[in-house]
Amino acid sequence: MMQVARQEDRVTLLQTIPGIGPITASAIVATVGTGRQFSNGREFAAWLGLTPLNRSSGGKERLGRISKMGDQYIRRLLVVGMMSRMRQIIKNPERYDPWFADIVARKPGKVAAVAMANKTARLIWAVMTRNEPYRIRTI
């Protein structure tokens, strides 16, 4: 599997994203392909079941639990990868994106992992559709 992951260009591109290893990247490429069937990253994250259910009414926004309507295997791989990444962030929060360190500090562990998986799914869509490796943005 590692040899196949090294030979496939899209799999190596996805592995540039922190928290995405060869198994997760291979599963995403095998299931999704190029990702062009989704119009944006939120649509891809919703397809995976990582976006909250919207039960808003009368101008009052109510976001519920995640929908869990999509691909269970990929969603599970992403959440497990983010749980692993959370352990690294807890040890050295200054080495990581402040958004990730903030969400880990504010939310319970599994909620933070799902939020991180949602954001990572959006990054995955961007990397797949642009066909460029992930670069950390500097302000």
Image: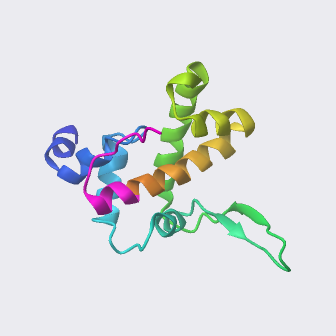
Among all residues in the image, which is located at the extreme bottom? Answer: 58
Q: Splitting the image into 4 quarters, where does residue 23 fall?
A: top left
Total residue callouts: 0
Who's the residue at 65% across and 42% down the image?
A: 112
From the viewer's perspective, tell me whether residue 80 is left or right of residue 62. left
Q: Main secondary structure of the magenta part?
A: loop
Residue 122 x %, y %: 46, 57
Above or below, comparing residue 108 to residue 54 in the picture: above
From the viewer's perspective, tell me whether residue 72 is left or right of residue 15. right
Per the image, is 133 magenta? yes
Who's the residue at 35% across and 75% down the image?
A: 37
Who's the residue at 29% across and 51% down the image?
A: 26
Residue 71 x %, y %: 47, 63
Q: Splitting the image into 4 quarters, where does residue 116 fall?
A: top right
Per the image, is 113 magenta? no
Residue 56 x %, y %: 79, 74
Q: Splitting the image into 4 quarters, where does residue 107 fall?
A: top right
Is residue 110 or residue 97 the one in the foreground? 97
Who's the residue at 84% across and 71% down the image?
A: 60
From the viewer's perspective, tell me whether residue 81 is left or right of residue 21. right
Among all residues in the image, which is located at the extreme front? Answer: 139
Q: Which residues are magenta?
A: 125-139
Q: Is residue 74 visible?
A: no
